[in-house]
Image (cartoon, rainbow, N blue to C red):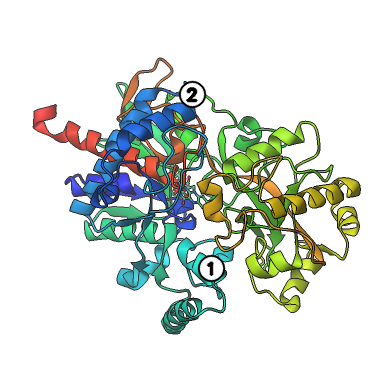
Amino acid sequence: MTAALVAASEGLRTLLIEKSPQIGGTTARSSGTVWIPDNPQQHRIGITTDATSAVTYLDALVDGRADPKLRQAFVAAGPKMLRYLETHTGVRFQIYRHHPDYRQDLPGAAAGGRPLEPVPFDGRTLGKDFSNVRWPIPEFMLLGGMMVTRGEAVRLQSFAGSLDSLWLGIQLVTRYCFDRLSHPRGTRLVLGNALAANLYKNLLERNADIWLEGRTSRLIKHEGRACGLAVDRNGKQLKVRAKRGIVLAGGGFPASGPWRERYLPKPVAQYTAAFEGCNGDTLQLALDAGAAIGPPCQDNALWFPSSIAQRADGSTAVYPHIVLDRPKPGLVAVNGAGKRFVNEAISYHEFTRAMYASHRTVPTIPAWLVCDRQFLWKYGLGMIRPLSFGFVLKPHIAGGYLKVASTLAELAGKIGVNADGLIATVNANNTYAQSGVDEEFGKGDNIYEQGNGDALHKPNPCLGPIQAPPFYAVAVFPTPLGTSLGLSANEESQVLDSSGNPIPGLYCCGNDMNSILAGEYPGAGAQIGPAMTFGYLAAMHAAGEARPEST
Ligand SMILES: Cc1cc2nc3c(=O)[nH]c(=O)nc-3n(C[C@H](O)[C@H](O)[C@H](O)COP(=O)(O)OP(=O)(O)OC[C@H]3O[C@@H](n4cnc5c(N)ncnc54)[C@H](O)[C@@H]3O)c2cc1C
């Protein structure tokens, strides 16, 4: 949608083709954070030297496994993309001042400022087209349809019972109640839903053509140039001619069983929180037209550890454990031996990689998040929100999502892990909680982890005792939030063939583009940031070809 919006703003006639009945894909389900170093919002608060340290950071992170030109192009063009959107469109972001990069162990990691979040969007401004915006994941909404930002969730969670929390709650719920008089869900959109809806609105305002329920099924080439698409729509196959360019942005293959089987590590992930339409369709049509894939990344995916449950309507809920529980004090993640295998507070991507690494020697898929009643009440666990009374827990226990026991040995039996191992792990955790030092994994040692812990908890915001029965556990599984293996592309987003030459007229971005960071995850927003940047670059390249001075 960014590519389409930039193309439309550049005066090109633009067609957006979406195969499902609603726009937004995984982006609409996401937190919508974009990781863009050296961004205009940083400049406005006086940080003007971020580009160099960002390159240092990315170089250290990627460690020679991807073409440096791609990440240099990203660092150079990301701020231009944001400025372009600010100048020519209504798409806006605000800075996360305190959102540290994930790999604080690497040179150039920042304490904040690189991630930006979409500003809230009023869905009412879309009129009847509001229904064309994909819904967020139900478990990420409150009261069945109300969205809150991550900051609001933290305020509601950490100051539960305080005046601040009460006032925020009253404001949000009042607006939501009014919304529900006329809409099936809240119209105050935040996170990725705000981003998708805002891009959509801007496209509509520019009279871009938008085809819903149109599936691109074949690429048409003429004399080596991609010049059109076959689109299945309303039971017919239509042919669309593209004068300037085609941008593939089908969201990779996180939702395709066969593609996951072929490219992801074993045991193969069975679930994903990504949109089910992201099933490799657009990758396949590019491959059929001579495009190249890769090079492969470490595990070809970006990961969340997620818990799985069945919803009341029979559908499967995939709940990503992003930051709300794992880094909080009083939780351990254990494998089949009842042992910790990871620093629970590290990024979701590295946490899941550690599950795979541990699974090579000890069953760790699923891994178990273990806590006590105090933790569950204060911070919640996965789909169980903080301040949940016993009657709220009951269906989760009955459905098998939440395991509960009055002793650790009994809990170990219920979740099938070694009891002595689990008791020893919890004893060690309780010692670390007192000293504030995790002697095994260093949990809570850096600002990223501390920021996601509980600032009011001392001496270490990420380390707390597990001692007040009953004890609880939830299973987590590796689930791709997106895929990092995609089409080989250059700095202009042009898709390359197997000889490394651009296929004229063909571009890609998002998860359809091979990760410019070899599948590494520098910080929050590291998927959508590059996706929008390379979407912008694709559109500008196509528009540039249209300009007489550059042809
Ligand atoms: C819960 C969650 C939270 C996340 N939070 C963040 C975050 O805050 N920041 C971040 O950077 N990343 C985040 N991610 C990852 C990020 O959302 C995705 O990597 C990103 O949105 C993918 O964008 P995309 O444009 O490639 O694909 P999408 O946004 O998924 O869009 C692809 C669209 O293409 C359509 N499509 C596919 N094939 C065809 C076809 N043949 N014809 C027509 N249409 C087709 C699909 O239906 C879909 O609508 C999150 C992921 C999840 C699951």
Question: Which of the 4 quarters of the picture holds residue 78?
Answer: top left
Q: Kindly identify the residue that appears in the image at 56 percent across and 49 percent down.
A: 449
| Circles 1 and 2 in contact, beta carbons < 8 Å | no
Q: Secondary structure at mark 1?
A: loop
Closer to us: 419 or 525:
419
**Looking at the picture, does residue 291 appear above or below residue 255?**
above
Q: CA distance from mark 1 to mark 2?
A: 38 Å
Closer to us: 468 or 35:
468
Q: Kindly identify the residue that appears in the image at 45 percent across and 43 percent down.
A: 527
Residue 467 in the figure: left or right of residue 285: right
Q: Few, some or many C-alpha atoms within 10 Å of disc 1 (few <14, some 14-19, many ≥20)?
A: some
Q: Kindly identify the residue that appears in the image at 13 percent across and 28 percent down.
A: 550
Q: Say which residue label 1 marks.
A: 141
Q: Few, some or many C-alpha atoms within 10 Å of disc 2 (few <14, some 14-19, many ≥20)?
A: few
- Where is residue 218? Give x, y as percent: 43, 36
**Looking at the picture, does residue 301 appear above or below residue 499?**
below
Q: Residue most toward the left? A: 549
The C terminus - image quarter = top left
The amino acid marked with disc number 1 is Met
The amino acid marked with disc number 2 is Asp
Closer to us: 344 or 512:
344
Q: Residue most toward the top? A: 499
- Where is residue 506? Give x, y as percent: 33, 31
Q: Say which residue label 2 marks.
A: 63
